[in-house]
Amino acid sequence: MKNTFRLLLFLAGLPSVIYAQKGVTFYVDGPQLKEPCGNPVILKGVNKMNIWTDQTGASFPEIIKTGANAVRIVWAVRYDHDGNENTPPIPSSDAALDNLIRLCIVNKMIPIVEVHDATCYWPGMQMVLDYWKRPEILAIINKYKNYLLINIGNEIGDGNTTANEFESGYINAVSQLRNAGITVPLMIDGIDCGKNLEIIVQKAPSIIASDPLKNLLFSVHTYWPMNNGATKAFITGQFQSAKNAGIPFIIGELSKYGAWAGEGVSVCSAAGEVDYQWMAAECQRLGIGWLAWEWGPGNAGGGDPLCSVMDMTTNNLYSGLTGWGKDLVENPVYGIKATAKRADILLKDCFCENVMLTVTTTSIAAFEGRSVIYERLYEWRTNSRNIRDYILEIEQRGRARSERFIAGRLRAETSIPNRYKIRNGTVRLRVVRNDGSSCYVTPR
């Protein structure tokens, strides 16, 4: 066995080409969001009010049936847990959030977590930042950093919040979160309760410039009233202006209802309708991502019984999709099912490392009175420079052990594989990346 390992560790004339090391998080490159492997990602998915309606993630296996590649997990620092306004809100569960992120990843969707406490309330910014900086939350972010996006806060700032406040406030917010060690993309909602895209276009460049990682994504919530100025020309002009400016942005909340309809008029009445179809079609034309509001049910829980029309599904099931929600999922031109592409990093183990593993099993004739001997040859190759170690997890004759190999001392060229042979046993190949995270390689 030792002789085999000596062969495995043989230095094999490393190629002179130096391969670029990919990042370990999603990142923003110019106007595009990219997965750690470097492939562009256009977010297409839904919002889910997990904090109030689904803290266990039971909705995710249903949402994945839409083809969504992302879920915006609505969360909170503290929340009303019993529907009684006279009962003080309680802190949210860190363990529940951890599990929701995990389940989102298991279901092959990008988790985007936001906290809702400072909605339309600019003075609430610091409370939100303090939440993200808690050691327990930082640990969760670090645990899932390969897959996670953080939406700093939902719609912080109302119509009275100024452009300069937006700029200076988010420069400060980004600084605090980066200094706390958060490296994942940070998503920033527009002011005026999320609706103001013009100020995003105006101030995004300076906010991005302040970020040492240049890893920011902006979000507008397009509750623009169809019957009060939000014409097709207006919508196209808003989107085109942001695209022309090279702003990395998505529609963080897209719905048929929710536009301001006047004092005392329900945003979920006909007066509050939004031309979501034109918005979705223009997003498809321009390559803009969007997240539908909201999976449902539960929108009537905000106090307006008419707002059940904002539920995409009546029963939390894919089969319960109805009306505009069904259209945003199944429309052949702009629907999620027809246009969303899942991130490769969520579809393939060790995808970014591009490790190709093959296993060949051979039966060797047994001596009389002995069982058949099976010999397995494991061969793997890669051109990645983002691998620190290989761990061979070996099971043989009922015993388990592991062997560690330093990647830099193995063959790196793709033409000659590294080999390991074992009789009557199995091996799992685990790759340890440079940042310490790891993944298992699935034979191809």
Image (cartoon, rainbow, N blue to C red):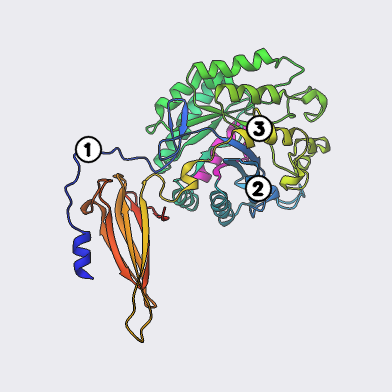
Look at mark 3 in the image and give the residue it sits on.
335
Q: Which mark is residue 17?
A: 1
| Category of crowding for the residue at label 1, using alpha-carbon neighbours closer than 10 angstroms: few (below 14), some (14–19), many (at least 20) | few
Between 226 and 164, the residue placed more toward the observer is 226
Q: Is residue 161 visible?
A: no
Please name which of the two marks, 1 or 2, marks the residue nearer to the observer.
1
Q: Position of residue 100 (x, y in %)?
A: 58, 51
Q: CA distance from mark 3 to mark 1?
A: 43 Å
Indicate whether 403 appears above or below 302.
below
- Give the side of residue 38 with respect to residue 347, left or right: left
Between 226 and 67, the residue placed more toward the observer is 67
- Secondary element type, mark 1: loop
N-term-proximal mark, 2 vs 3: 2
Q: Which residues are magenta?
A: 109-133
- Secondary element type, mark 2: helix
Q: What amino acid is found at the position of numbered circle 2 in the picture?
A: Asn
Q: Which mark is residue 114?
A: none
